Image (cartoon, rainbow, N blue to C red):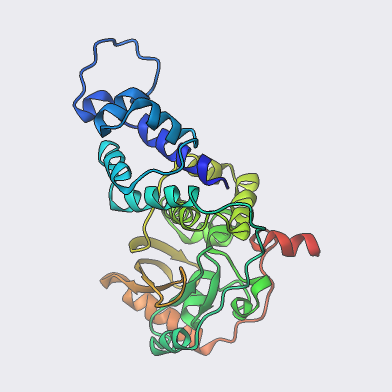
Amino acid sequence: MSSKSELGEFLRTRRAQLQPADVGLPVFDERRRVAGLRRDELALVAGVSESYYTRLEQGVSLNASQEVLDALARALRLDETERRHLSDLAAGVVRKGGERVRKPAPEQVSETTRQLVEAFGDSTPVIVLGRRSDVLTWNRTGHALFAGHLDPQSPEHPAQRPNTARLVFRDAHTRDLYEDWPKKARDVVGRLRMAVGRHPDDPLLAALIGELVVHSPEFTAMWSEHKVRAWDIANYRMRHPLVGALDVTQQAMAVPNGRGQRLVAVTAEAGSKAALTLLARAAAETTVPTRAPDEQARPACERSAS
């Protein structure tokens, strides 16, 4: 993942989604050769020179100020999440290069985070995700809701950790969990985009994205849209094999000092509380047999070693 190319692709994609009328510009020639705004039109609206904007889009100019980024964000009609992503991409471009990229150490859950998960008990499904969307830990109901077909102890072993992005795109059980699977998939892709902006030099994140591009045309198409999603609140209708349909709200909260970790807690809408209670009871009473992840849901490095 090149920070220069990521920044340029993001700017080009957003520029193509705007028409002159969207930014108050007149159109004198209806036979336009570009789908959206031209570079000179965006530069005019943002108040920067066309040559400077072109260099920025091509990755030649490496020192965009925050004032310029704010002007481009306004011209491109970016929301707050997209503005943060633009700033992250620009910051990645100016980071020092030439250093050897080392494989990062496995992410760990702090003892205080484990205590927080335990404080929820088993009535509320809870999982903790790392910056690459790896499952770092979960409670029994969280495991039962999201991946009851996998080994409940797998998050404790870095090489076997489930990855929610990989599960959504490459695991049939997870795909069937979501009635509106495309919505869930786009949310996952948008959050990976945010992660790339903040961690452009992470080789494991790059490997995950490369794997999904190779194996999932749906992921590739969504990835090319350069849409970003914040970790906040999302509503889904899930179809669980044990308790049937349930409408849930997934709320993501940043883990203090967690370096990108998120705690995701799940609550149910009024009509689905009974189903969630039933799932929590089943998770507490049932000993789930240990089982390795499905072939397509296992990390690429683990599959190649087997």
Quarter of image, res 117: bottom left
The structure residue drawn at horizontal position 56% and vertical position 62%, both measured from the top left corner, is 173
Left or right: residue 19 versus residue 293 is left
Instruction: Confirm whether residue 36 shows in the render.
Output: no
Image location (x, y in percent) of residue 282: 48, 83
Please identify the residue farthest to the right as the structure is shown: 306
Left or right: residue 165 versus residue 68 is right
The structure residue drawn at horizontal position 42% and vertical position 53%, both measured from the top left corner, is 88
How many numbered marks have been drawn onto this rendered protein structure? 0
Looking at this view, is 121 or 205 the one in front?
A: 205
Looking at this view, is 198 or 81 the one in front?
A: 198
Instruction: Confirm whether residue 247 shows in the render.
Output: yes
The structure residue drawn at horizontal position 41% and vertical position 76%, both measured from the top left corner, is 255
Quarter of image, res 289: bottom right
Image location (x, y in percent) of residue 61: 45, 37
Answer above or below: position of 122 versus 14.
Answer: below
The structure residue drawn at horizontal position 61% and vertical position 56%, both measured from the top left corner, is 208
Image location (x, y in percent) of residue 302: 73, 65
Answer above or below: position of 142 versus 297.
Answer: below
> What quarter of the picture does the C terminus occupy?
bottom right
Left or right: residue 273 versus residue 61 is left
Image location (x, y in percent) of residue 211: 64, 51
Left or right: residue 305 versus residue 40 is right
Looking at this view, is 284 or 208 the one in front?
A: 208
Looking at this view, is 210 or 237 the one in front?
A: 210
